[in-house]
Image (cartoon, rainbow, N blue to C red):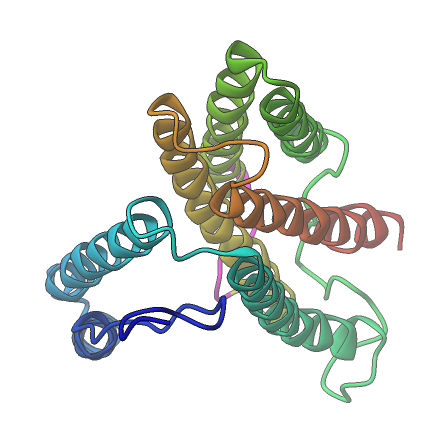
Amino acid sequence: MTEHSVSHPFHLVAPSPWPLAAAAAALVLVVGLLNLMHDGRTWALAPGALALAVVLVAWWRDVVREGRRDHAHTAPVRRGLRLGMALFITSEVMFFVGFFWAYFHNALHVSPVIANQWPPPGVEAIDAFGLPLFNTVLLVGSGVVLMGGRGGLMAGDRRRMLAGLLLAPLMGLAFVVLQAVEYGHAAFAFRSGVYASTFYMATGFHGFHVLVGAVMLLVMFLRARRGQFSPEHHVGLEAAEWYWHFVDVVWLFLYTFFYVWVGLS
């Protein structure tokens, strides 16, 4: 055994500046967010958001290089990456559980400040069977299209793979645009009470997650065009697909309880 031989299949990460740089950029972003909420300075978000975006691009570029150039993503490493993504999605589930908790705490009249009516008097819920229903079909359909794209990868069908990886995020971006249109036609504002605030916070953060997922899938599309995925090695695509199905499932719960159930109550 030579001096530089490796006796284990695990990847020992080289020293990297990106964790510290990401923490610093996130701090600048939070300070900008506080300025936005306190003084209405929208521009204050720009430095932190730009710095964080640059750091993340550089960090993920290094992760891709580790897998492709250094061949560091062995089978045990890929299992660890999948586990990490699964735990991240679990933390995101808990994030939305908080919104649902606040919603049902008031909708089921646990809170003593809510009258025996949900939504509260004076608040008209959005029709569940108009634009929200179309958006639901659009988002769920994008998940089906994405599964078809990954199926193309496994079957060696490049055209099918690229079509799925491009169409799915475009459908997600259309979902975000139509949700913004829906907000513009809503009969209540964010400050119209607890129903309005929980509605906008839950659906708005979900829309942000759809936007993030669409960016992830577009990156996967570009990587797929460069031939960086194979049936045996596509952990990045798997992670993006898991995340996309997560936002699909969350939306089904949001649509059921924030649109359909409240419209029937």
Q: Nearer the viewer, residue 38 or 218?
A: 218
Q: Which residue is most to the bottom?
A: 112
Q: Which residue is most to the front?
A: 1
Image mark count: 0
User: Residue 129, how many percent across, how many down?
Assistant: 77, 31
Q: Which of 122 and 240 is in front in this view?
A: 240
Q: Is residue 169 left or right of residue 91?
A: left
| Residue 130 figure quarter | top right
Q: Nearer the viewer, residue 128 or 169?
A: 169
Q: Residue at x 64, y 26 (%)?
A: 154
Q: Can residue 187 be seen in this view?
A: no
Q: In this view, does 94 lie to the left or right of 209?
A: right
Q: Is residue 24 above or below residue 173?
A: below
Q: Is residue 120 visible?
A: yes
Q: Which residue is most to the top?
A: 159
Q: In which quarter of the image is the N terminus?
A: bottom left
Q: In which quarter of the image is the C terminus?
A: bottom right
User: Residue 65, how many percent across, how many down?
Assistant: 28, 49
What main secondary structure does the magenta stretch of the protein show?
A: loop
User: Residue 159, how many percent across, how many down?
Assistant: 51, 10
Q: In this view, does 90 lie above or below 170?
A: below
| Residue 168 figure quarter | top right
Q: In this view, does 254 lie to the left or right of 67?
A: right
Q: In this view, does 87 lie to the left or right of 140?
A: left
Magenta stretch contains residue 157 = no
Q: Which residue is most to the right?
A: 265
What residue range appears in magenta? 185-191
Q: In this view, does 71 lie above or below 221?
A: below
Magenta stretch contains residue 189 = yes
User: Residue 171, how many percent across, how many down?
Assistant: 53, 26
Q: Which residue is drawn at 67% across and 59% down?
A: 122
Q: Which of 83 and 7 is in front in this view?
A: 7
